[in-house]
Amino acid sequence: MTNPVTYETQGAIAVLRINNPPVNALSQAVRQGLSDGMDRAEADRDVKAVLIVGEGRAFIAGADITEFGKLPMEPNLPDLCTRIESSPLLVAASMHGVTLGGGLEVALGTHYRIAQPTARLGLPEVHLGLLPGAGGTQRLPRLTGADKAIEIMISGRQIKAAEALELGLLDKVEEGDPQEVGLAFVNELLANGAPRRAVSELPAAAPIDWEAAHAGALKKGRGQINVGTIVRAVQAASELGFAEGMERERGLFMELLQSDQSKGMIHAFFNERAVSNLPELKGVAPRALNAIGVIGGGTMGAGIATAALLAKLDVVLIETGQEQADAARGRIEGNLQGALKRGKISQPQYDALTTKALTLATNYASLGEVDLVVEAVFEDMAVKKEVFAKLDAACKQGAILASNTSYLDVDEIAAATSRPEDVIGLHFFSPAHVMKLLEVVVADKTAADVVATGFELGKRLGKISVRSGVCDGFIGNRILAAYRTAADHMVLDGASPYQIDSALTGFGFAMGPFAVGDLAGLDIGWMTRKRKAADRHPDERVPTYADRLCEEGHFGRKTGAGYYLYEAGSRASVPNPRIPELIAAEQAELNITPRDFSDEEIVRRYMCAMVNEAAKVVEEGIARRPADVDMVLLFGYGFPRYGGGPLKWADLQGLAGVLADIEHYAQEDAWFWKPAPLLKSLVADGRSFDDLNRAGG
Ligand code: CAA
Ligand code: NAI
């Protein structure tokens, strides 16, 4: 294996150049190469200084995440940083692209730091459930003070060069070839007799109110534990000597590395990338994608149009009449004004997007030039079929015809056209310009390059795209229906919707199922229950108290009342007193004596329902791999990132225990709690969902 760190001398300076594509992660070979390079430079009597630079697109993107969880290999990163810092030679880093995590810790181990104006620095370990474990928590506060160091490490944000200079993380910012500007900088330091300057030898940061900082961090972390640990590590940097502080940091880092939260977040890191690498699409080129059509400019259509405009695609949006078209334009402009306010686009960009890039029309002839159309009209098969027949007639050959349907059969929709191979489902989530998930729904006849174009669109829009097969609700809404049912059953049996919402936000969900229902609109579920009523199995338990609420005209947030009451113009809500009355009436009718539920039982039943349905979705091939389901729940349904997703959660809990609980619940309701055969077979074979991920399916 070639050494990923090359050594050359330029006058009195030894240049250590890291070349470990794609992002110069600090693998064992890189760590060894840097350590050997330092040895060699120190042994060379003509060398007075060392310059570390990176080849390719980044200086160093951090520790090699693929090595986490494996046996540690020498030299370890903290020792390497200390080894660099304690060199008698003057050591500098010249940075470009990103310098992240362990990469920044290496740079903080050098004595001087220079960077390109476009460089970005950060300590993103917080997003992996960790803390900077190679001296970052000890060195950074010595440069920036404790408050700023905590903010940087808890946000994990990438700091631009200009700010890094102001904060003292950099000594100089200069444009040019990183090696050339680095050499000039170090030569200047040598000429001026600049001293070695170790960050660890700087005075410790002044103390702050640690308890307040700790509590504040945990509050912001909403269940994420490492944010509090980061504060404790910074506290150690302030209160202990450097060597002792380093030991404390190591101990805290190892604790976090063993935690389920870190395992969940590392699972998320790899799988949010892996999810769009479909083997069947290797070598399949996507079709051209310059202009898109959107049919229907309601909630979803307007959001999809906004996302496309922000991604520099031209948009033609079709509505049923001028009034609806004007309303759709209003919604899109409102969304774009939000982007303008947040600094995502400038005023001239806003003007160009709303005039040149966006066209509203009421007739399908305007769609002649678009490369892809997303239909987002009412959720009604007859309406969808009519729209697709019109699209078939109006769109050019090769144009892709996509539906944003939530539940309906994409095969049936495709059959309404003469070109089913060009038809696909592209299921966005509300609000479509904000939510990261896109389900790419592949129907029986969808062509491979149409699927590739669906993924390409997702990439351009900055989405996490997940392949789904066709079934009622696809991956996400089908699983949602199952865990939502489990919640409804608990309500009938005695848990209040408010206790359930609170138990689940306590678990880490962004919102509980009842608050979500109010937000999405209770009429959707009501209509679905009515649609399915005729085919119900007699053993199926279907609570009806929510139907009473809808019959009384309450559909959630949009009508001001649902499970909660909403005051006009306010985001705050209070429990709706009508709900306990309706529940009590139904319990009396069904002869149910309500019982108490602990929060723990609520979470367990909810999660077991989610895992059981998810296992069925994987087994049926609707989802390609267990990790795909995890990414759907993470990016579309508010599952906490530190949980990794329901199937990662199940693995970490132990599948045998999850199955045992499902079988136990089945004793009271065998119709609902049918254990997934895949779950049973994994337990029987002593395997996990992650084993299936590794096997590729
Ligand atoms: N280790 C291993 N592989 C890494 C990696 C890392 N630190 N960072 C990125 N990669 C891999 C990705 O998995 C991806 O691989 P595939 O092409 O096989 O999917 C490839 O590099 C390119 O990554 P992206 O697709 O994400 O490229 P990008 O240009 O969009 O983003 C990036 C580049 C900003 C570096 C981004 O990858 C990133 O944020 N990486 C993680 C950085 C990080 O968290 N560093 C801290 C590591 S923890 C640490 O350092 C702990 C410590 O203190 C000991
Ligand atoms: P909506 O009711 O807000 O908007 C539908 C729009 O389509 C209306 O503006 C209507 O005027 C227009 N329309 C109806 N028939 C049309 C036709 N023949 N030609 C052109 N325009 C027509 O509905 P929403 O919520 O935007 O949903 C649209 C689709 O997206 C549905 O299939 C829904 O299931 C799906 N969806 C909805 C989500 C949500 O959270 N609201 C999430 C994901 C998908």
Image: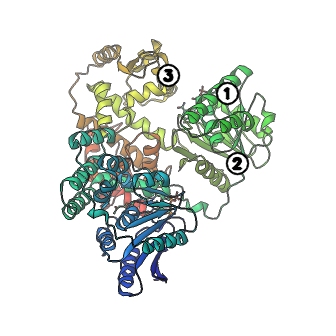
Query: Between 516 and 168, which is closer to the camera in this rendering?
Result: 168
Element carrying mark 2: helix
Q: Name the mark on residue 523.
A: 3
Q: Residue furthest top?
A: 552
In the figure, is residue 243 to the left or right of 418?
Answer: left
Q: Report if the beta carbon of the residue with label 3 is closer than 8 angstroms to ligand 2.
A: no
Residue 528: x %, y % from top left: 50, 27
Q: Quadrant of residue 16?
A: bottom left
Task: Determine contact: label 2, label 1, CB under 8 Å.
Answer: no
Q: Specify the amino acid type for callout 3.
A: Asp
> What residue appears at the point 51 percent right and 67 percent down from the top-left corner?
22
Marks 3 and 1: which is nearer the front?
A: 1
**Which residue is label 2 attached to?**
422
- Mark 2 and mark 1 lie on one chain; the one further toward the N terminus is 1
Q: Say which residue label 1 marks.
A: 329
Q: Report if the CB atoms under discs 3 and 1 are less than 8 Å apart.
A: no
